Every structure is written in structure tokens, then in C-alpha cells.
Amino acid sequence: MAVLVTGGAGYIGSHMAWALLDAGEEVVVLDRLSTGFRWAVPPAARFYLGNVGNRDLLAQVFAENNIDAILHFAGSIVVPQSVAHPLEYYENNTSNTRLLAAAAIEAGIRHLVFSSTAAVYGDVADDRPVVESAPTLPKNPYGQSKLMSELMLKDAAVAHDFRFVALRYFNVAGADPQGRSGLSTDGATHLLKIACEAALGHRNAVDVFGTDYPTADGTGVRDYIHVTDLVNAHLMALDYLRKGGDALIANCGYGRGYSVLEVLETVKRVSGKEFVVNLSPRRPGDAASVVADSTVARELLGWVPRHDDLDLIVTTALTWERALVERKDGDLRTIRHKLASAS
Ligand code: UDP
């Protein structure tokens, strides 16, 4: 049997493809390469170029491979972009998930792991870790588009022979400790990526979005989780579904938050580099503090995080950021070489 990884050329999806191959699984990747890279897909994975919203392509992928489970990463994830272009987010994140689930059910594929997000919670009432049963009041179209997908999957799991696990990611960061993948997306807006770029001199400064939040130092607090622990939660979810587990929604985070200023201090200390920090106004759609209670993932999926260490997250992110520049240069050279020899 094979596992379909949508978005397998992206940040988390590519780590997932490597982890599945490490676990002896057969891997099929579907990605339209809008933000991902072909070189990020492990060579041993079978690759299809295209959109999850392409019904004919899905039918072809299902016909050509013996797929028993889908890990659905493909989607759009930038909060401010979702505020500016909400309908694009509802298409990529909600409509395409609906289409994928319908196609899977029609093809008799019964298991799906969905990339959801802590953004479904919106502002958390207090600074205690949030549980899955907490009210879901997204503050932006991104969170809304993911929440709508969860609701659809829930109803589909009641009506059909189909089950899913939605993993609500907190702030995924860091890179494969073996150096095979990392966050490569151009123009990424995530704090840790931006801080690493500043530490390596690839950008001049880092803006701190908001210093008047009701948190200890006034800056936003997030639960940063190492990407390797996150993909391991997916392996556990896959195993859970294959063993007949019921539909489930589970948080993925460590249960401890760091403020923006704490993250920036850690990047400076670990890298040994100074960079300029600008205190700036709040960013639209941001919540004050979002920290996970992951009891469900630990108890029902048997998830055991092994990289709960901000220094390790920063170290692996910095290592990847250094390698990335060379890798992208290399990729461009390969493309140019191919174009030159084809003409
Ligand atoms: N943030 C910041 N400067 C940046 C990017 C992010 O101050 O350049 C803050 C943001 O306001 C939030 C935290 O860092 O409090 C994490 O933001 P990120 O975009 O990494 O993830 P999100 O929590 O929005 O998914």
C-alpha cells in the first residue's frame, strides 16, 4: 500500500515524505509547486505535478497507485495573506479539501490525516494551554478555512466508511536534524525563519508585531514545535487510523510558550549574531497567546515528543538556512542547464 502526501514538496510535507520512507512506506507526492520545490521531494517518492483541486488528476493518481491513506498538507498558510485574499484561502484550504475527501471516498480510500491549525481557536480566554474542546473562534480567514474543513470531514466520517485525524499544529519550526529538508519557501513570514535570515545577514532587521499584548513582556506568545515531532505525530495518526481508530482532532504542541522577544534572544544567542529589532504595531489577525494542551495526541495517538528544545529548533533552522542558499543556487543551475540543453 502507498501513502499519498499532498503538498509533499513543501516544508512539512517534505519532512513527512522522508519520515514515511524511513518507516518503510511507499510514498506518492502530489504538489503544484506553488510554494514548494521539486528538489525537496525525496527521490524515492513518486511525484505528480498538479493541484489537489484537479479531479481528473486525483482519479489518475488513485488509479495508478495502491493508496490506502492520504496525508493532506497542501494548502495556504499565511495569516495576513488570508485577510487580504480570503476567497483564495477558502478555495485552497476548504474547497480543495472537500474535493479530495469526496474523491477519496469514491475511490474507497478510508484514511485521511488533515493539517489543521491552532488558528482555529482564535484568542484563547486565558494563558493556560488550550484543549481541543475549547471554543473555536478563528480571528482570520486562514483559521476559518481550516475549521470549515474539519467540520466537513467530521460530517463525512459519520456518513461514509471514512475516518480522519485532524492535527491542529501550533508553531511548527526547525528542520530535519539529518539536513535533508527545512523551510525553503520564498517570502516566508514565520518569525523563526525571519529571525534566522536576519542572523545570517540575509535581511536587515526583524519587526516585532505588537508590544502591548496581555503577555509577560507584551509580545505574542506561541508554542514552537519541532517539525520532526510533528511528522512523527502524523505517523502515529496513520497507525491509529489503520488500526481502526475513530475520527479524532488533536493538538500538536509542547504545552509551553515563548514570546517573540524570547525567540529573538534565543536566535541571537545560538547564532552568536546580533541583528536589529524594530518594535512595530500589531499584525492584523494575530492572537496574544496560543499554547497547546496535547493530552489527546499523547494518550490516544501515543505521541511522544522528542525535540522539545527551542535551542535545537533554532540550531536546525539555522543550519538549514545556511544550506538553503547554496541549494537554491544549485537548483537554478540545474534548471538553466536543462533549458540550455533542450534549446
Ligand atoms: N511575528 C513577529 N514578527 C515577524 C513575524 C511574526 O513579531 O516578522 C510574531 C507574530 O505576531 C506572532 C509570532 O511572531 O506573535 C508568531 O508568528 P508566525 O507568523 O511565526 O506564526 P503564527 O502564529 O502567525 O502562525
Image (tube, rainbow, N blue to C red):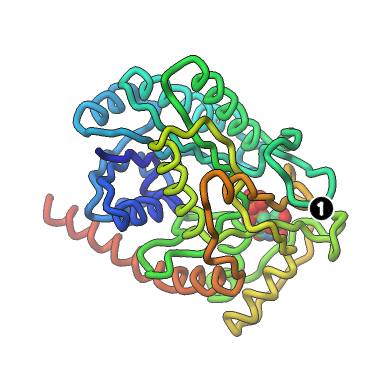
Q: Is residue 55 above or below residue 289?
A: above
Crowd tier of the residue under label 1, counting other residues whose Cα lies within 10 Å: few below 14, some 14–19, many 20 or above: some
Q: Is residue 223 left or right of residue 62?
A: right
Q: Is residue 68 left or right of residue 264?
A: left
Q: State the image quarter where residue 85 is shown.
A: top right
Q: Percent from the top left, x then y, of residue 217?
A: 84, 65
Q: Percent from the top left, x then y, of residue 171?
A: 61, 54
Give me the residue at 50% from left, 24% from top: 95
**What's the residue type where badge 1 is placed?**
Asp
Q: Quadrant of ligand 1?
A: bottom right
Residue 187 seen in the figure = no
Q: Nearer the viewer, residue 83 or 343?
A: 83
Q: Is residue 208 above or below residue 54?
A: below
Q: In the orientation shown, which residue stands out farthest toward the top?
A: 159
Q: Is residue 101 left or right of residue 109?
A: right
Q: Percent from the top left, x then y, of residue 3?
A: 31, 40
Q: Is residue 213 above or below residue 203?
A: above
Q: Quadrant of the N terminus?
A: top left
Give me the residue at 52% from left, 25% from top: 153
- Helix, strand or loop at mark 1: loop
Q: Nearer the viewer, residue 105 or 275?
A: 105
Residue 337 seen in the figure = yes
Q: Which residue is mark 1?
A: 127
Give me the residue at 12% from left, 50% from top: 342
Q: How many marks?
A: 1
Q: Percent from the top left, x then y, of residue 83?
A: 66, 37
